[in-house]
Image (spheres, rainbow, N blue to C red):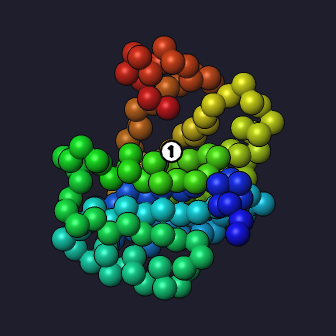
Amino acid sequence: MVDKKNVIMVSVIIPTYNHEKYIEQAIDSVLMQKTQYSMEILVGEDKSTDNTKKILQEYEKKHPDKITVYYRECNLSNAILENAPDLRRRALGKYIITLEGDDFWTDVNKIETQVKFLEEHPEYVAVSHLCNVVDENSQLINEDYPSCKQEEYTLNHYLDGIYP
């Protein structure tokens, strides 16, 4: 038996709650990735009250080798064991990427580019990128996402409440 921990390079975790309008686009943006690196997709369905669960069940059927969904028995948003941290603990990849269930990627080379950088630069522990803010129809809106504007993000940024 092959040890999955030695095989999986990237774990994409997708915490989701009531994202029926967006979850397909989020997952599809991961599935479209062109990368040489092995990947797993872990979704935490946080007891949504809309059709998010049904949509995820269909994705599980279509992609059983790529997608694992954890269906929560109760909403974890205010629990000690929260959705995203639980997914991070379950992740087997060398690298972990979080994608919220109402967000999506537009660059098919995102994973390839970021993992290649980290593999070639072991002095870095993480990467991030700029993002565009869109409305519920994926149309760009004139909103600036609050983030670090410098080329390199440091522990001091984090301690000052500036996020990547």
Query: Residue at position x 42%, y 69% from top?
Result: 69
Residue 63: % across, % down: 55, 79
Residue 155: % across, % down: 51, 18
Q: Is residue 160 above or below residue 118?
A: above
Query: Residue at position x 63%, y 24% from top?
Result: 151
Asked whether the viewer can see residue 33, the reply is yes
Q: Is residue 138 above or below residue 116?
A: below
Residue 11: % across, % down: 57, 55
Residue 18: % across, % down: 26, 65
Q: Is residue 70 above or below residue 62?
A: above
Which residue is the extreme one toward the right? 120
Asked whether the viewer can see residue 109, the reply is no
Q: Is residue 58 above or below residue 21?
A: below
Q: Which residue is mark 1?
A: 131
Query: Residue at position x 58%, y 40% from top?
Result: 129
The kind of residue tagged 1 is Cys
The N terminus: image quadrant = bottom right
Between 78 and 139, the one lying in front of the other is 78
Per the image, label 1 sits on a secondary structure element best described as: loop
- Mark 1 closeness class: few <14, some 14–19, many ≥20 residues within 10 Å: some
Residue 145 is left or right of residue 117, and the answer is left
Q: Quadrant of residue 126?
A: top right
